[in-house]
């Protein structure tokens, strides 16, 4: 009974444990973000803070398709990807608070989550600046015969930048195993996509470079997973890059400094009706894959993880002054 229900919801290869883990991860990201916003408002976090609320299905669905040795590279709205990739949540929170125990020893902050041991290569602040890096990583993978797929996240705004076009051109030319995943959340800072881009469908921007592309509902974790899975297979087979446009929406402002005066409240409310976490939870319940007790347990576990992360971060020491000049140059 259970196996056939799982097959109905997700197709072969997805058992109940995996599906509940997707819900767990999305909830953990949402709660981590809400807590970060709160700590920022209380002056515990400095610098920029871009929250990922509303886009959780994109990170969780896409990253679930990666193998252990694959690589991930992202823009600055990077907490969700880090959590979905399994980075230590305590150390991520400590990074936000600038502590010595942070994932980058407190030197990177929100926009630069990084963990080489898990193939998480950032966290980059320059819009589209990491796309050429993704191509370089793909080239290295081919050159060294590693069969590593590189999953590269960026926003709709990045597609209007020169780096984007150079990267796609070289990616196709060199047939690198890069999945370009564009999260179209309809805005780049306070500018709506139709005021910044000559083409409304980001997916069409792959065509000039002969890169196969697909558009997918970013509020549906399983749809994102399915599309990314095909893209990753394509890249791993040696068929070169693939482009995905994930249609999503950020529920909060661009950053904590954003008063959100540029978009209609009705539009925000409309998208909130499509909250990826609520939709997925209801789907699991409908398919009898999630009991009230299981939901309560996931809620409790994710609450506890965030409470523990804050405790760990707050009790951690600041980086010592004596380390100030360390990690500036790479060792030859
Ligand atoms: C080259 C460059 N130009 C401008 C900025 C300032 N900036 C930071 S985020 C951003 C908007 C990017 O929007 P998008 O790519 O859609 O990503 P989103 O924030 O929506 O996830 C801009 C213009 C920057 N960081 N880098
Ligand atoms: Mg955007």
Image (cartoon, rainbow, N blue to C red):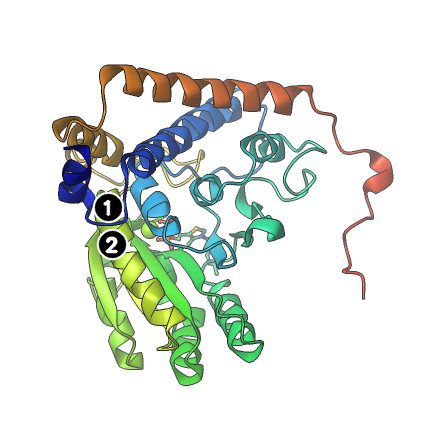
Q: Give me the residue at 38% from left, 39% from top.
A: 52
257 displayed left or right of 56 = right
Location of residue 58 in the rendering, given as x and y in whole percent from the top left corner: 32, 47
Asked whether the residues under the numbered discs 2 and 1 touch, taking CB atoms below 8 Å apart as contact, a structural biologist would say yes
Q: Quote the CA–CA distance across marks 2 and 1.
A: 6 Å
In the image shown, does 195 or 122 lie closer to the viewer?
Answer: 122
Mark 1 residue element: helix
110 displayed left or right of 332 = left
Q: Give me the residue at 40% from left, 16% from top.
A: 300
Mark 2 residue element: helix
Q: Give me the residue at 39% from left, 36% from top.
A: 258
On the rendered image, what quadrant is the N terminus found in?
top left
The reply to whether residue 192 is in sight is no
On the rendered image, what quadrant is the C terminus found in?
bottom right
Residue beneath disc 2: 226
Q: Is residue 269 above or below residue 175?
A: above
**Number of residues whose C-alpha sits closer than 10 Å to that of mark 1, classed few (under 14), some (14–19) or many (20 or more):** many
In the image shown, does 123 or 300 lie closer to the viewer?
Answer: 300
Residue beneath disc 1: 222
């Amino acid at each position: 009974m259970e196996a056939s229900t799982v097959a109905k919801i997700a197709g072969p290869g997805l058992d109940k444990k995996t599906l509940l883990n997707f819900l767990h991860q999305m909830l953990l990201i949402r709660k981590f973000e809400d807590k970060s916003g709160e700590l920022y408002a209380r002056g515990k976090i400095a610098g920029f803070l871009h929250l990922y609320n509303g886009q959780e299905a994109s990170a969780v669905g896409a990253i679930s398709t990666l193998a252990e040795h694959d690589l991930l590279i992202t823009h600055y709205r990077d907490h969700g990807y880090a959590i979905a990739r399994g980075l230590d949540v305590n150390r991520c929170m400590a990074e936000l608070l600038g502590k010595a125990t942070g994932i980058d020893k407190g030197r990177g902050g929100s926009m630069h989550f990084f963990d080489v041991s898990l193939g998480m290569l950032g966290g980059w602040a320059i819009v589209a600046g990491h796309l050429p890096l993704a191509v370089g990583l793909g080239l290295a993978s081919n050159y060294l015969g590693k069969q590593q797929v590189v999953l590269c996240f960026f926003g709709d705004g990045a597609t209007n930048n020169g780096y984007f076009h150079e990267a796609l051109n070289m990616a196709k030319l060199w047939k690198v195993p890069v999945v370009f995943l564009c999260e179209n959340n309809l805005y780049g800072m306070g500018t709506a996509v139709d005021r910044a881009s000559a083409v409304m469908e980001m997916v069409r921007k792959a065509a000039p470079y002969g890169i196969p592309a697909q558009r997918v509902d970013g509020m549906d974790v399983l749809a994102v997973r399915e599309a990314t899975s095909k893209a990753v297979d394509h890249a791993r087979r040696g068929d070169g890059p693939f482009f995905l446009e994930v249609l999503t929406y950020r529920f909060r402002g661009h950053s904590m400094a954003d008063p959100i005066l540029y978009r209609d409240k009705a539009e925000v409310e409309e998208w909130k009706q499509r909250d990826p976490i609520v939709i997925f939870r209801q789907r699991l319940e409908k398919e009898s894959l999630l009991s009230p007790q299981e939901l309560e347990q996931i809620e409790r576990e994710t609450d506890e993880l965030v409470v523990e992360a804050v405790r760990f971060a707050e009790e951690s020491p600041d980086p010592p002054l004596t380390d100030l000049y360390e990690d500036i140059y790479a060792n030859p």
